[in-house]
Image (tube, rainbow, N blue to C red):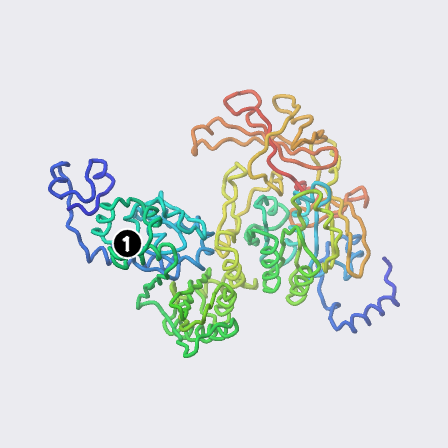
Amino acid sequence: MRPEPAIESLRAQIEKIEGRSRRLKSVLPFGIADIDSRLPGGGLTLGALHEIAGGGNGAVDGAAAALFAAGVAARTRGKVLWVITRPDLFAPALAQAGLAPDRVIYVEAGNDKTVLACIEEGLRHGGLGAVVGEVARLDMTASRRLQLCAEGSGTIGIALRRWRRQTDASDFGQPTAAATRWRVSVMPSAALPVPGVGRHRWLLELIRARAGESADFEVEACDDSGRLALPAELVHRPASAEGWRRGASG
Amino acid sequence: MVLAVDAAAQAAGVRVGMPATKARVLVQGLIVQDHDAVGDVQSLDRLALWMLQRYAPIVAADPPDGLVIDSTGADHLHGGEEAMLAGLIDRLAASGVQARAAIADTWGAAHALARYAAKPALVAPAGHGSAVLAGLPLAALRLPADMIAALHVLGFERIGDLLAQPRAPLTLRFGPQLGRRIDQALGALSEPIDPIRPDELIQVKRNFAEPIGAAETIARYIGKLVVQLCAELEAKGLGAKRLDLICHRVDNRLQAVRVGTAMPVRDVKRLTRLLTDKIETIEPGFGIEILSLTATLAEPLSEKQTLTAMVDDGVPDVSDLVDTLINRVGERSLYRAAPIATEVPERSVRRIAPMAPDTGATWPGHWPRPSRLLASPEPIETMALLPDHPPVAFTWRGIRRRVRHADGPERIRGEWWRRDAELTAVRDYFRVEDDAGERYWIFRSGDGEDPNSGSQRWFLHGVFG
């Protein structure tokens, strides 16, 4: 997106009227120009709530979405609070996405209400790098609370939407106060010249971004430091040559 | 007279109540010890103190052989009532005490169930009423022995027999105690527990001329009590690991709130926050007369503090958040993952305390691992070429998937040092990708040739992102 000075100055005026110093907010860039340029501020806003869901079967198992969240959390500093409802998250996979086991504190919460309360507590504390919570229902009121807590403390909050049944996933269309909303779906991996599974690929859909436009990206899954990459054939070369070799993992 | 026997003596035929001389004749070389009443009472008190520090704020000795615990407001720290009871019995067994325990709505009912129904633990459903008691013998009612004997003469055997009778003739004959015990067991009559308060615990207390009840008022006085308590803790160089707030209500009932912390704490703000989070669990009833705050478990603080400061190193301290969350969801629900050096995936993760020192260890990263691991591997239908090829297609949860790419096998051997059955067990793991790009972690139980190595059936164990 080309920067347009008139629109930029209008935005600045609106922010001044709103009284929030949004511009001062720091962001967490993905390090991929294509994605960062689509996001307001050039990355995921720290101190905001972001929503991630899986597409297809991922809406139920949330496997790719969890790794995407782990990749974001891995690139923050400090401990990460991960609130879960079902104990099927496999910690070694998070470690392979760059999130060291020493950094993650898991909370097993019985129901959505407790999950939301725990996320809120974590966001309000301010000493954490990121708070990730697996939650099925997230309405406007609840998400607004979380968003305000995140704004207050500057901690990035990630609502990992995960449903019990495929049909419940239509809930993802309901409006929430989250700053961005992503859908991560698995795609066939890159073909290798030898038998085997190549580096995992995802279709990353930015469904909604506050003060931004939606977009789709085809990316390669997190490497062992939580970074995504663009597939080589799209940019004519590996975005991070090293990542190609290290990160054939999922 | 024999008052108590151990398991070996019981097996040899010695019973409680038989004359000691008879027991000696029955068993050659029987070890007989004189009854030490004072010693029994003292050790019961010691056990009560141990319970107080670990389990619940209101504990009292129930002589001659029992303890009574009001677990309200404390079981959440131990993962619920069943888990707490099981853990309690296990820990007592580990220190050589055989115990039976029961949780019920009233002291009387719990007393009866623990002695006559628990094997070795029993949790009666809340609001159980008289149904759980009806089948128990009369001795469960805490009545004097001669009264029980007299009731037996009249033909009463079970508590249910008594409940069916009109109360007045019984009271006329046996006095008011019988009716009182029945009412106490059923909860019709209150029976306050007088909790033990050892002198060495740091305790602050506030009496109110007018009973208080509003949440804001309770919060204000909690704030004042915490300030006093912290001053006393500081004078002794201690930090609180467990705090009990006991509210004495005007109707002579006790309401207790217990909060725990992962590390000793002396911070007024933090402790106040932990306690005020729990105010909603207090039922003030007609009002609270006395608030007392006790540091049930205190540890020296200065040493720990330097340790955290060294570990910190720019990373903000989150122990207060951990405490808040533990008091919300329970200690077992908060953990960190740490690696175990094993190849079997489901055994490779152990849980450690959230504030345990960093291990720095991680899992070996040369084979990718799925982000979702199924609790138990699910059998799948496959079409596969034996022995070392991945399946061509498989059916999982009713959906058939064609395998486009596959990686493997990663051979994982059984841990023969755990069980003999695992000596020859083998699993061959494959990472497979279907047409839609969904990636799964499947394995064959066995090496494909040797029937000793496994059933040769295929299972799905995880989902990759």
What x and y, as percent, mark residue B412?
54, 32
Q: Nearer the viewer, residue A72 or A191?
A: A72
Q: Secondary structure at mark 1?
A: helix
Q: Nearer the viewer, residue A115 or B82?
A: B82
Report the residue that reaches farthest toward the bottom.
B209
Across the whole image, how many numbered discs are drawn on residues? 1
**Can I make out residue A242 in this image?**
no
What x and y, as percent, mark residue B366?
60, 39
B426 versus A178 height, above or below: above
Residue at image position (52%, 36%) is B344
Q: Is residue B270 left or right of B240 when viewed as pictured?
A: right
The crowding category of the residue bearing disc 1, from other C-alpha atoms within 10 Å (few below 14, some 14 to 19, many at least 20), is some
Q: Quadrant of the C terminus of chain B?
A: top right
Residue at image position (43%, 33%) is B417
Q: Is residue B168 left or right of A190 when viewed as pictured?
A: left
Q: Is residue A180 left or right of A124 when viewed as pictured?
A: right
A138 versus B17 height, above or below: below
B367 versus A135 height, above or below: above
Quarter of the image for residue B15 reads top left
Residue at image position (61%, 51%) is A99
What x and y, as percent, mark residue B54?
38, 57
The chain that hosts pointer 1 is B
Q: Which residue is mark 1?
A: B170
Kind of residue indicated by mark 1: Leu
What x and y, as percent, mark residue A241?
73, 45
**Can I make out residue B375 in this image?**
yes
Q: Nearer the viewer, residue A133 or B73?
A: B73
Quarter of the image for residue B24 reads top left
